[in-house]
Amino acid sequence: MKRLRIEHETGFLYESDVAASYNEARMLPGTTDSQFVLNSALEIEPATQVNSFIDYFGTRVSSFDVLSPHRELRITARSLVEVRPRPIAHTGITWDRLAVEVERAVSTVEHLSQTDRTRPHPEVVEIARSIAARHDDPGPAAHDVCMAIGQAVEYVTGVTGVHSTAAEAWEARKGVCQDMAHIAIGALRAVGIPARYVSGYLHPDPNPEVGTAVEGESHAWVEWFAGEWTGFDPTNNTEIGDRHVLVGRGRDYTDVPPLRGVYGGGAKARLQVRVTITREA
């Protein structure tokens, strides 16, 4: 188990004053069966009142308005979280049994349909079907599908954008964690395995020194349902461990952006992001 302190700064610089802005932030982790939030807080400049709620998919949301003219919006999320590894354990469910289990809950059915972001390239569908045909248990099949995607796509920044689709990233065979998660989700759904997008943070060092602050990153991985929900990080081809801090879940990135909002005025906005992670224990 590791104790991680996370500081996530983000916001916008505007070319001129904007009259007002209306925003939602998904930057604070929640307590789950594998992580415990010791403390967390959101700081906003210009100062304003924050309304907090849990969205449909179980993600903590901070909603706020800035109703006075401003040229900069800065949000800083600070969290201290204890995280334990989440090793993969397959349940031994069959494909026929999975099909029955999926239909019993909205939480699994809604993660079986493709979105515009996850709709897979035909080559990805063929890969997923080929792997699924070799397994009687959809759990190991899902694991192998995610590993195949991680091995096939090179991690390269700047090739794709925040609005890129899984099919576009696959054609380039390059992308970032968001792209690999979308490709893997599309592949899993194509063979009848419910899959969801997970957003959070990742400490970049497998063996971080206690007390040393490092530049971290927002990260994305996947969870599939094969009797129970199981996570995997296709970008790093690894199980979800005590370096992964979960913030939100959804059908794709559209459900869990760290910051989303609108503002009044014609000024152009420039996004700023910085994540710092420190292991404290």
Image (cartoon, grey):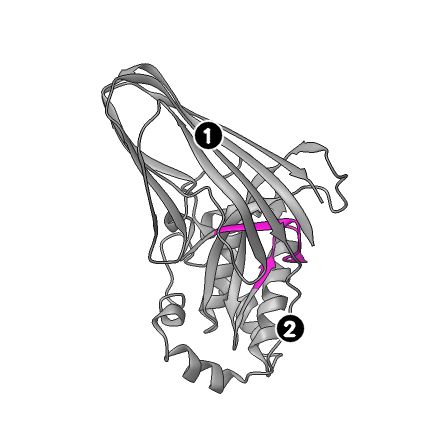
* Residue 22, quarter of picture: top left
Q: Which residues are magenta?
A: 231-247
Name the residue at 56% across, 54% down: 36
**In the depicted structure, whether residue 29 falls above or below residue 212:** below
Name the residue at 45% across, 59% down: 120
Residue 183 place in picture, x, y as percent: 50, 56
Q: Nearer the viewer, residue 154 or 24?
A: 24
Return the mark for residue 192: none
Q: Can you identify the residue that label 1 sits on?
A: 10
Q: Looking at the image, can residue 121 be seen?
A: no
Q: Looking at the image, can residue 69 be seen?
A: yes
Q: Earlier in the sequence, mark 1 or mark 2?
A: 1
Q: Nearer the viewer, residue 97 or 42?
A: 42
Residue 197 place in picture, x, y as percent: 47, 56
Q: Can you identify the residue that label 2 sits on?
A: 89
Residue 253 place in picture, x, y as percent: 42, 49
Q: Is residue 99 left or right of residue 130?
A: left
Q: Nearer the viewer, residue 94 or 173?
A: 94
Kindly give the residue lying farthest to the front in the view shown.
Answer: 38
